[in-house]
Amino acid sequence: MTTVLISGASVAGPALAYWLQRYGYEPTVVERAPAPRPGGYAVDFRGASMTVLERMGILSAVQERATRMGAMTYVKESGKVAATTSVEAFSGELEILRGDLVDILYDLTRDTTEYIFDDTITELTQDDAGVDVVFESGTTRRFDLVVGADGLHSNVRRLAFGPESSYVHNLGYYASVCTVENHLGLDHTGQILNVPGKTVGTYSARNNTEAKALFYFASADLTYDRRNVPAQKAIVEEQFKGLGWEVPTLLEGMRTAPDFYFDSISQIKLDSYSRGRVSLCGDAGYCASPLSGMGTSLAIVGAYVLAGELQAAGRDHMRAFAQYDVRMKDFVAACQKQAVDGAMWFIPATRWFMRLRNLTFRMMPYLPWRNMIRDMSLKVGNAIDLPAYEDRPQRPGVRRP
């Protein structure tokens, strides 16, 4: 049986594990965290990714835990409403909290996939027949294939492809998201404040029992320790101090938030998503950035295509990886372009453009092209032709240690 080690237990990793075991492979997922990671912001599905969820048999489960968010409101520092967006501008066809999606995918695969938590890969050595892997725990194992599904700062990509600086392209922004109290009593909606080069807001979550605070800002490249959360919070604090509206309250909530995310808004650009017996999936291979609204869709679709091409190629990984590149290339390009185009709307650089953006949103319901945002997003979401890969019966589930 062909063995595949997958690094990363967020979205792309478990999704890939599902399809691989369905096609008769033996997947193992290794994750640095001690358990599936909770928290995170809302993630969207559009177009082809909805088809993949249906083919996985989890579309209804995702729908049951959907955020069901309504329109978002842009406000001024005084709290006065400046504009209201359409639902599609933020939530896609289907929206769910990232942590809830991770739970669904883990429950789907935990009985048929070996999960190794609290460990990571430190060495990869390839030969013609397989890959020798050394783990941080000291364990050594051999696999037929290895897949990096470990995000923007992929450890597998660094080991197999080279330094991160060769592939990461920063878009000139940083983002932070955390869970806070729903102190505004938001009901399946959110509010956003813009000042030039900065976006800050909050939206309700988990049936209004909590909220997410978001902080986005334009900046040249920053130097900071990615494992030093207090230092990252200090960066956010410095960027947003002195702003009005609800910003002081949101910053106060950030200081004690049970979860906290901070990173550059960046994209990964590669000529090929594979090197020998090692391949990449999701953000590790083609991160489009949170501004695209397509990162999770890319991960779900990419996992489906990578496993499907291995199945279609009769386990010839070189042929499968080459076809994976071909199928994903245009889809990745469309998603990454959407992020670049959307940045100027979500994080306006000038007050003049803020006023123009707000005027556009106010007029949109009365214009012939009022469905433009929805239609453009769906066009990007469907910018790939999904084959119906030949299936085979699933092997019996075996509960892994």
Image (tube, rainbow, N blue to C red):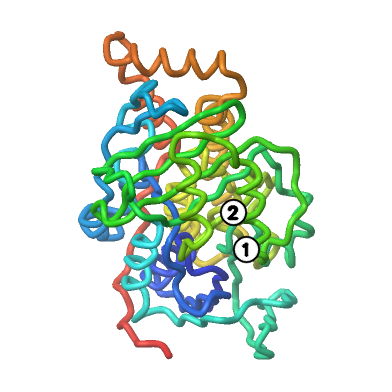
Total count of labels: 2
Quadrant of the frame with the C terminus: bottom left
Asked whether disc 2 touches disc 1, contact meaning CB atoms under 8 Å apart, the reply is: yes
Q: Which residue corresponds to the image point at 39% horizontal and 68% vertical from the top-left?
A: 18
Q: Which residue is mark 1?
A: 229
Percent position of residue 189, x then y: 29, 39
Q: Which residue is mark 2?
A: 262
Percent position of residue 161, x then y: 74, 59
Q: Given this view, does label 2 or label 1 mark the residue nearer the observer?
A: 1
Q: Amino acid at mark 1?
A: Val
Percent position of residue 14, x then y: 43, 67
Percent position of residue 110, x then y: 37, 78
Residue 339 is drawn in which quadrant? top right
**Is 329 located above or below residue 7 in the figure?**
above
Q: Which is nearer the N-term, disc 2 or disc 1?
A: 1
Identify which residue, 173 or 212, lies in the foreground.
Answer: 212
User: Mark 2 and mark 1: span between their CA atoms?
Assistant: 8 Å
